[in-house]
Image: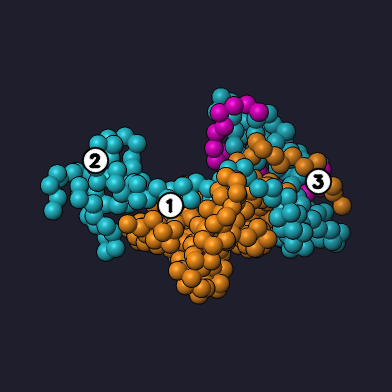
Amino acid sequence: MIQPAADAVGSGHDDVLLTARAAEGDQDAFAVLVTRHAPRLVRLAVRLLGDKAEAEDAVQESFINAWRRLPDFRGHSAFGTWMYRVVTNRCLNALRARRPTTPLHEVLDVAAADHSSSPSRMAESRAIAADLRTALAGLSAEQAVCWVLRELDGRSYEFIADAVGITENAARARVFRARRGLTHALGDWR
Amino acid sequence: MTTDPDPAARRPGPDEEQLPCGRLLSQAWDADPGDDHPAHCPSCADARRRLAGLRQAVLHLRDASGPALPDAGDVLRRVMDVVRLELRPGAPLPLGTPDEDMWIMESAAARVLRSAAENVPGVLAGSCRLVPGDRRPDATADITVTISIHAPATAHLPSVADDVRRAVATAATDRLGLGPTRVDVHVTDLTEEDR
């Protein structure tokens, strides 16, 4: 049997070439795509789910599905955009399955008590982040996802609308309602 | 209620709060850096003060989840473990005459041919499909290869395409033992630098 030449797939190949090769069964090309996109997608999933192990699982499953679906992928969008959308929607479903959780006002009372006596600035900063994370868990999954893409991942409303499959105005409205809910939860509303 | 009509003000959505200046609360949060209205507007300033606690919390949470990218080595390893069990080898291609009964899978052949194309300076190979023609009883089947490449923008494209065609045809017959090979080269993009 013929031994293929040493692996020559590398950083010179852009995603378009790699996606075409992976669609035709080139595993090395797919490995380069995973290496290139996984870190950003894991960070996105951690921001959405708040849990590293769960985030890694979501990204892993998304890539495995991508490998299976690549032969039908026609490149209407770039591979990176496609994966961002797939991971976002997988996390959205995970969040939906997680809810309903404790009502917002109850979790916040607990969160406030947790850090009231934190001594250092660092601990306070961690506590504020934890409060917000807790408050986020009280939002609807749809609001939380749009808010995270906007405020933590810095995406445009147009991008969010495309990723989640809603109109730009609906994306704006969700971010707005999420922000209002969070402001209220953090006790600074009026 | 709006005393100072502002061309940048948007119509409020069902839940949006409109500030006394006509702007929406969301506009006070997402201030456009090129817009000097918020810097001079007391109601926007007041709105930003109300939102200051949330903004601080957002910065803390953003710092907690970045900006350093996480190591995704575990994800790569676990994904590739599954991918290596789910091969997509493509169709079998005949090597030699029918009574020799030898075959090579399309994806394995494509690897060799892409690599041959990339021996031409500056060329990067993408899609590579191989389609066998009709088999004759006493001869190896014709093969048509369609390969997509990115070529250097500075190169003379007909020469590059010729070089690729020759390199791929030679590899197909000499290295793989495929039959007479016709090679279609598609230049799908131009790269800025010779690599």
- Residue identified by numbered label 2: B41
**Amino acid at the residue labelled 2:** Cys
Quarter of the image containing the C terminus of chain A? Answer: bottom left
For marks 2 and 1, give the CA distance: 21 Å
Badge 1: chain ID? B
At 77% from the left edge and 42% from the top edge, which residue is drawn?
A: A7
Q: Which chain is orange?
A: A
Badge 2: chain ID? B
Residue B16 image point, x, y percent? 28, 59
At 24% from the left edge and 49% from the top edge, which residue is drawn?
A: B23
- Residue identified by numbered label 1: B54
For this view, does B190 lie left or right of residue B120? left
At 84% from the left edge and 61% from the top edge, which residue is drawn?
A: B101
Q: Write down the region rendered in magenta.
A: B175-195
- Residue identified by numbered label 3: A4
- Is A94 drawn above or below residue B67 in the view shown? below
